Amino acid sequence: MPASPDIGKVFTVPQLIDAFARKFYYLRLSITDVCNFRCTYCLPDGYKPGALGNKSFLSLDEIRRISRAFASLGTEKVRLTGGEPTLRRDFTDIIAAVRENPEIRTLAVTTNGYRLARDVAAWRDAGLTAINVSVDSLDARQFYAITGEDKFTQVMAGIDAAFEAGFEKIKVNTVLMRGVNDTSLNSFLNWIKHRPIQMRFIELMQTGEGGGLFQRHHVSGEVIREQLLRQGWQLQARARSDGPAQVFSHPDYLGEVGLIMPYEKDFCASCNRLRVSAIGNLHLCLFGESGIPLRDLLADDGQLDDLQMRIQGGLRGKRETHFLHQGDSGITQNLSFIGG
């Protein structure tokens, strides 16, 4: 079992700072855009091969070099994303490769939970420290309607298996949708009352392929926040390598609630994360442009300095904010395209 991430901490001087003095400690690393679910808000028609062109996904050695470069530039947290990252046959090896860097104290995965029950113990042994599971409904029939897969029982068993494997807290992601799950707060709160789960409600975001769905189902996270505050939940402080969630706790609940509201004023002011796509492009924003190629510098270990310089140089072009309020989602056609 891996040592606690707080043991033997290694602190590096942050070298990823943009023109607006934001410091970047967090890398979201996509390792595939393939997904086996057909969620209504992401891939309603299922995964289509070739969405990223005919390019292959990053190899294990390329992932190792990317993580080494970011670690040396002050990155403390890496999240493996997709698509569904656990579909990669070398997923356990990828975990071990990223954890070779002592500077990276948190290594997380966002997963649909499909393979949790089978493999989570091996992932923890390889060095995984945190898990986010996507669960958009606690009703098995609605879960099937949203995901296109009758896997609710399997995913719930996977969450139990993660606790049994030694994970002390699990984060569960729910995309908030009007007329679908926006009135289910009490059901979710009852579920986490005696479980160390951080229930995270994520506002539906507009993408190139999902404009109609956004217009029908978007609802502000303020609806949930107002209910939480009325019920005595308290906003918690945010650590420098945390994600964008506003986290609330309550003395009567073992679990927590997180709200991710990208349409709220000043959402981007606290941005601390960068993204690398499954084909090796650096993306400065989930809703940005085509990305900055890194792959030509991943062929061997001798290009580490050039790789670091390109990452740092690219960061100078990061915009102060996204333009979602104007309906501009950049090149992001769906949330599996870069990694959500």
Image: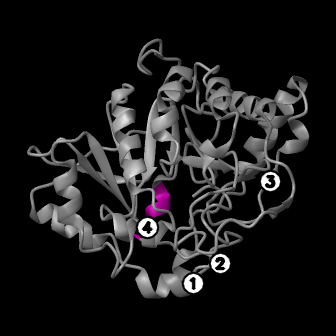
Given contact means CB atoms under 8 Å apart, are the residues at marks 4 and 1 in contact?
Answer: no
Magenta segment boundaries in residue numbering = 264-269
Q: Residues within 10 Å of mark 2 (few under 14, many from 20)?
A: some
Residue placed under numbered mark 4 in the picture: 144
Residue placed under numbered mark 2 in the picture: 208
* Mark pair 1, 2: CA separation: 6 Å
What's the amino acid at mark 1?
Answer: Gly
Foreground disc of the pair 4, 3: 4
What's the amino acid at mark 4?
Answer: Tyr
In the rendered image, which quarter contains the C terminus? bottom right
Q: Residues within 10 Å of mark 3 (few under 14, many from 20)?
A: some
Residue placed under numbered mark 3 in the picture: 292
Which sits earlier in the primary sequence, circle 3 or circle 1?
1
Residue placed under numbered mark 1 in the picture: 211
Q: Residue placed at 55% from the left, 38% from the top?
A: 25
Residue 268 in the magenta stretch? The answer is yes
Q: Quadrant of residue 170?
A: top left
Residue 145 in the magenta stretch? The answer is no
Q: Residue placed at 28% from the left, 71% from the top?
A: 222
> Could you tell me which secondary element the residue under label 4 belongs to?
helix
Q: Residue placed at 52% from the left, 42% from the top?
A: 115
Given contact means CB atoms under 8 Å apart, are the residues at marks 1 and 2 in contact?
Answer: yes
